[in-house]
Each structure stands twice: as structure tokens, then as C-alpha cells.
Amino acid sequence: MPTLIPSNEDVRVYEIAVMLQPDLDQKAEKNLISEVEGHFADAKAVTIFKDPWTKRGLAYKIGGFTEAKFIIYYLEMDPSVIRELNKQLGLTKGVLRHLVVIPPKGYEAVSYEDRYHDWLKNRVTLADQKQNKREERLKQTVTDTAKRAAKRMESKPKEAPKLLEIGQLTEQLDKLISDDDLKL
């Protein structure tokens, strides 16, 4: 990503955010972007970096729209033409809003669209967070129960199994076989 440093003392770097109507078809959108970039060319601006965004929701309606397409431009141009450029952008049909700012010294242009898509891929939703917490609590409960059971087993003295004599064994087997619950 480029660091925004002017090439000479006569020019300044500007960040210009342009908000476009979201309902334009591809051809109309392409023509509108060409018109906006034509204004930049008329102002003899040099594009350092361009960051086109997908449709984004707006905090409030602008021109009846709740969404807009954004393009962030980083341009190097003469400060004397900025007023005229600002006026032309304001009069361009299809541009809902625009904003011209001077980025601070040493500012590095970053593609927020790329960061946004990375965030979408890697985000953990609130439902995912709740599910992960439930799973962690369940794992902890199972672990605690197993530890308590192991301690109980350790604390009980182990009894030697009783050995039956052959007569007692035969007696118990006869009792089981003759049991009325068994329907043999």
C-alpha cells in the first residue's frame, strides 16, 4: 500500500470519498465513475490509489437510498483546483455525497474493502460465541464430574471379590434358572 507523500511542494495529497447511487446498472455506474474520474483529469489530479467498495448500508437515508456504493480515491493535485473539483462533484448526477480531506503526514493508504472481506470470512458471530461458551461449559462439567468420580473410586477401599464354593454357585444358578420372570 502506498504511503501518501506529495511528489513536489506545489501539490498536495487528498483523500476523496465518493458515494454513488446503489441502483445503477453496470453501464450507468461505469459511465458515472468515468465522469467522476474525468473531473479528476480536468483538475490534473494524479491517482495514487483507488479503493472501490461494494454496497454498504447508510446510517440514514440520503436521497431516498438506504445503501450506497463507495469509492475512495487518493489523489495528488494542486490545492488551487480543489474548490472547483468540489463544486463539480456536488453537481454530478448520481453522486449522493462526497468528502474531500487531507490525510495526515505519513498516512498509508489501505484497501478497506480487502480488510472488510477478510473480516467477513473470519468473523465469529454472536450465535457462534454463545455456542462456543456452551460447549466449553459442557466440557468443563464433564471434566469435573470425571475428576470427582475418580476421587471417589480412590477413596473407597477395594474389597476382594467373594469366592463362591461350588455348592453355593450351583444353588444360585438353580435359583436364576427357576425364576418365574424368565419365560423359557
Image (cartoon, rainbow, N blue to C red):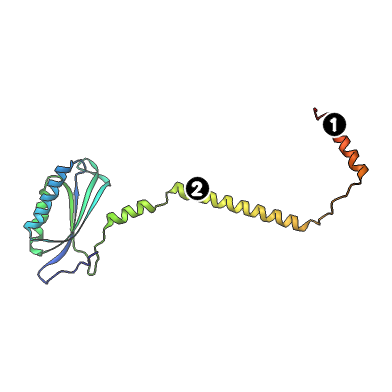
| 87 left or right, relative to 114 | left
Q: Is residue 98 above or below residue 65?
A: below
Q: Secondary structure at mark 2?
A: helix
Viewer-nearest residue: 81 or 133:
133
Q: Residue at x 26, y 61 (%)?
A: 110
Q: Quadrant of the N terminus?
A: bottom left
Can residue 39 be seen by looking at this rendering? yes
Viewer-nearest residue: 97 or 149:
149
Q: Quadrant of the C terminus?
A: top right
The disc label shown at residue 86, or none: none
Q: Which residue is mark 1?
A: 179
Q: Residue at x 20, y 66 (%)?
A: 4
Residue at the outermost right position: 167
Quarter location, residue 100 = bottom left
Q: CA distance from mark 1 to mark 2?
A: 51 Å
**Mark 1 or 2, closer to the camera:** 1
The disc label shown at residue 131, or none: 2
| 157 left or right, relative to 16 | right
Q: Residue at x 20, y 49 (%)?
A: 19
Q: Amino acid at mark 2?
A: Gln
Residue at the outermost left position: 42
Q: Amino acid at mark 1?
A: Asp
Residue 156, percent from left and from top = 79, 56
Viewer-nearest residue: 142 or 9:
142
Quarter location, residue 61 = top left
